[in-house]
Image (cartoon, helix red, strand yellow):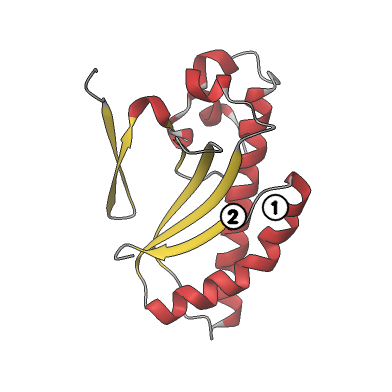
Amino acid sequence: MHPQNYTIITESGMDFKCESENLFHIEKSELYATLSNVKTVEFLLLRNRTPEEVWLVEAKSSAPNPKNKIDFDKYKNDIFDKITCSLAFYFSLHLGRFKTAPQCLPKKFQQLDIAAVNFKFIVIIRRQEKNWIKDLQDALLPMFTKIANSYNLKAPYLAVLNAEM
């Protein structure tokens, strides 16, 4: 048995310890840096389960009060954009739509059977009141249900958490 190599990603005041071979730090991808007007999550994490899962992880330091409709709607739409663009970007890389895909996409992500893998959308907010977490989850769920149905993803496909959860 060989020792695991880990990568620590610090984002929004939180540290995420991930097995390096199961991590695609999408924000640090050289190819992503060349794209314009494409939002992304912090990273994709391969979870060795049956079936395999890829988590699209978006980290936030805080969130607006759900009662502030304008700020809250902008916030949830930004999360939706980041996650859906990240999913599309990963599929584009996996399908070889970019010539540099093999250099930027980790080997385990290249080898995934994307027809069999399940995708989970994970939003982690560092400082957030627990009752606001439920409000955000409830607001995002109908938006992500459309995506989940389009890709035939298995529930639960969305989790909104605070750093304590």
Q: Residue at x 55, y 49 (%)?
A: 120
Q: Is residue 11 left or right of residue 157?
A: left
Alpha carbon of mark 1 to alpha carbon of mark 2: how far? 7 Å
Looking at the rendered structure, the kind of residue marked 1 is: Ala
Looking at the rendered structure, the kind of residue marked 2 is: Tyr
Label 2 secondary element? loop
Tags 1 and 2 in contact by the CB under 8 Å rule?
A: yes
Q: Residue at x 63, y 66 (%)?
A: 141
Q: Residue at x 65, y 48 (%)?
A: 84
Q: Which residue is mark 1?
A: 148
Label 1 secondary element? helix
Q: Depth check: 44 or 118 in front?
A: 118
* Few, some or many residues within 10 Å of mark 2 (<14, 14–19, 20+): some
Mark sitting earlier along the chain (1/2): 1
Q: Which residue is mark 2?
A: 157
Res. 91 in view: yes
Q: Percent x, y for residue 142?
A: 69, 67
Q: Depth check: 15 or 161 in front?
A: 161
Q: Classify 146 as above or below 48.
A: below
Q: Is residue 94 left or right of residue 127?
A: right
Q: Percent x, y for residue 97?
A: 71, 21
Q: Depth check: 1 or 25 in front?
A: 1
Q: Residue at x 41, y 32 (%)?
A: 23
Which residue is farthest right? 150
Res. 37 in view: no
Q: Classify 76 as above or below 138.
A: above
